[in-house]
Amino acid sequence: MFRIGQGWDRHPLAAGRPCILGGVAFPDSPVGPVGHSDGDAVCHAITDALLGAANLGDIGRHFPDTDPRWAGANSLELLREVVGLVQKAGFRVSNIDCTVITEQPAISPRAAAMQDALAGALQIASDRVSVKATRGEGLGPEGRGECLTVQAVALLMTGQGDE
């Protein structure tokens, strides 16, 4: 059996904030996402996609931003925790596809490193994690550089073997 889930996350960007996306630091980025945790919107969107596919709620139910335990949390670690919940529910991750919508930082130079970091947390091969990027082209809050948005799709499966 297969289950599909989709996730979406958006964080405002601010100067001087650390920029971590997909578990990878962007040390040269002049802006970083603002969030209760580390603001890693890539991990957050993928987390929601996994939780949705397994019918386990959403990231806010598991890691509420009103709980001080999650302040500054490493979102890649939260993703690992959710993979465990998904597995406990009888599923395993088949593949992930995500799109980062932002003017900065430039994603493509670090996309392979992001795929590797995410694959490790997801317990799948890197070639099963797609990280793509696009720009707002001057339109909307992404195009004005105010925020970044991530869309993600997750495919879960039950059973054994490689498809």
Image: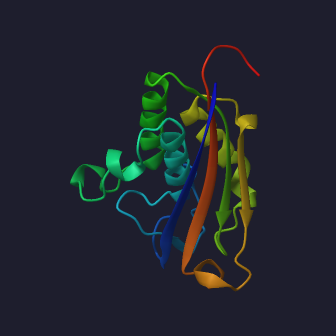
Name which residue lies at 45% across and 25% down.
89
| Vertical order, 111 against 89 (above or below) | below
Relative height, residue 137 to residue 78 (above, below): below
- Residue 68: image quadrant is bottom left
On the picture, is 66 further left or further right than 121? Answer: left
Quarter of the image with the N terminus is: top right
User: Where residue 114 sits in the image (x, y, percent)?
Assistant: 64, 48
Q: How many marks?
A: 0
Q: Is residue 19 visible?
A: no
Query: Farthest residue toward the top?
Result: 160
Residue at the image point whose x is 65% and y is 71% from the top: 102
Residue 144 image offset from top left, x and y in percent:
62, 85
Residue 82 against residue 136 in the figure, above or below:
above
Q: Does residue 4 appear to the left or right of 134 in the view shown?
A: left
Nearest the camera: 127 or 162? 162
x, y (%) of residue 36?
34, 61
* The C terminus: image quadrant: top right
Quick check: 89 left or right of 36? Answer: right
Quarter occupied by residue 67: bottom left
Task: Tell me which colouring the rendered structure shows.
Answer: rainbow
Residue 1 visible? The answer is yes
Measured as percent of width and height from the top left, residue 122 is found at: 57, 34
Q: Nearer the viewer, residue 151 or 34?
A: 151
- Which residue is drawn at the image coordinates 58% and 67% (left, top)? 149
36 and 28: which is toward the camera? 36
